[in-house]
Image: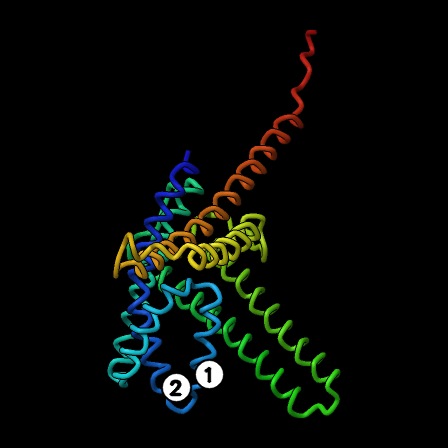
């Protein structure tokens, strides 16, 4: 049963996600490196949002690499970085496609060229969704700061600030659900597609990813013994573990959806066969 292979597939995705991370950072550093010199607070704020889910120990290594490449950002590196990031990230999306095709038991699959074009398009779409999600958090905090600045009454200003932040987090959560929905809708090469904004598997995957990410942060906070085992590689191992959890929750949600859809299809076939009436034998 494929469910037994989810853990192995998640490890595969974790490797591909890690493989795609640093080219993506190279591209992001080129973009933010050109803008961060004039908008340093925006740069810092976006990294603070990433720190909410990425383990602190791993985030330190990521930010160190990020800052090193940002210092050398240029227009030539920007162009090369964008191409390298999209191509490398699409390798991870291709791995997601192959896994979901196995889950949905897809026999007829597109050619390598078509599948890679699909993966690149899906990579761009997911990157745009994540960017807008982070921007919504930034806008919520910005509106909250404006409320405290221009509203004279403290109680009303606090209410407006809380409302703006809640709306920002709601939009970001909605976009996270959209990212899962887009992945589950476009990644498998099924003939019949049915769009659902939030599926049972998507809800479980999102909740599991958030809880697991926070749980990993809490565990590393109270049991910081990873450096004794892995030494200087501890931060990389933690980051790889977080990517493994991300892939596992993504595949768990897809497996739940495939099982539900398979059971629904089998129920429809059973119902249709039961409704089939056999003509009576006139000789009886």
The residue nearer to you, when weighing 126 against 145, is 145
Q: Residue at x 47, y 50 (%)?
A: 249
Q: Which residue is mark 2?
A: 36
Q: Earlier in the sequence, mark 2 or mark 1?
A: 2
What x and y, as percent, mark residue 191? 46, 48
Q: Determine whether label 2 and label 1 are within 8 Å by CB.
A: yes
Residue matched to label 1: 42
At x 46%, y 85%, the residue is: 41
Q: Callout 1: few (<14), some (14-19), or many (20+) C-alpha neighbours within 10 Å?
A: some
> Quick check: 151 above or below 212?
below
Among the 4 quarters of the image, the one containing residue 64: bottom left
In front of the other: 119 or 67: 67
Q: Quadrant of the C terminus?
A: top right
Residue at the spot x=33%, y=70% of the render?
24
**Corner quadrant of residue 178:** bottom right
User: In the image, which disc is placed on residue 252?
Assistant: none
Question: SS class of the residue under badge 1?
Answer: helix
Viewer-closest of 52 and 189 = 52
Q: CA distance from mark 2 to mark 1?
A: 7 Å
Instruction: Farthest residue to the top: give it.
Output: 284
The total number of labels drawn is 2
Residue at screen point 28% across, 60% down: 19
**How far across and down, in percent of the image, does residue 125 sit?**
44, 67
- Of residues 28 and 47, the one nearer the viewer is 47
Residue 198 visible in image: yes
Q: Is residue 154 left or right of residue 138?
A: right
Quadrant of the drawing holding the N terminus:
top left
Image spot of residue 92 (x, y percent): 34, 57
Please state the horizontal and vertical placement of residue 170, each as a whole percent of the image: 61, 68
Which structural element holds mark 2?
A: helix
């Amino acid at each position: 049963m494929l469910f037994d292979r989810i853990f192995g597939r998640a490890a595969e995705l974790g490797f591909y996600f890690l493989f795609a991370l640093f080219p993506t950072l190279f591209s992001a550093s080129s973009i933010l490196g050109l803008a961060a010199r004039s908008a340093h607070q925006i740069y810092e704020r976006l990294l603070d949002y990433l720190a909410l889910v990425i383990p602190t120990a791993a985030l330190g290594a990521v930010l160190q690499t990020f800052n090193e490449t940002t210092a050398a950002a240029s227009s030539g590196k920007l162009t090369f970085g964008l191409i390298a990031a999209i191509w490398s990230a699409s390798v991870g999306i291709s791995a997601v496609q192959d896994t979901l095709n196995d889950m949905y038991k897809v026999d007829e699959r597109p050619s390598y060229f078509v599948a890679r074009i699909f993966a690149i398009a899906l990579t761009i779409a997911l990157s745009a969704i994540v960017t807008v999600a982070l921007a919504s958090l930034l806008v919520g905090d910005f509106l909250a700061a404006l409320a405290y600045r221009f509203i004279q009454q403290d109680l009303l200003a606090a209410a407006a600030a809380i409302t703006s932040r809640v709306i920002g987090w709601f939009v970001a959560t909605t976009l996270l659900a959209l990212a899962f929905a887009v992945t589950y809708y476009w990644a498998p090469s099924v003939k019949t597609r049915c769009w659902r904004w939030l599926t049972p598997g998507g809800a479980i995957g999102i909740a599991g990813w958030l809880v697991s990410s926070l749980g990993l942060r809490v565990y590393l906070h109270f049991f910081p013994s990873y450096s004794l085992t892995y030494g200087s590689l501890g931060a990389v191992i933690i980051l790889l573990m977080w990517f493994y959890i991300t892939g596992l929750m993504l595949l768990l949600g897809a497996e739940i959806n495939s099982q539900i859809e398979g059971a629904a299809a089998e129920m429809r076939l059973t119902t249709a066969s039961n409704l089939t009436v056999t003509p009576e034998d006139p000789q009886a």
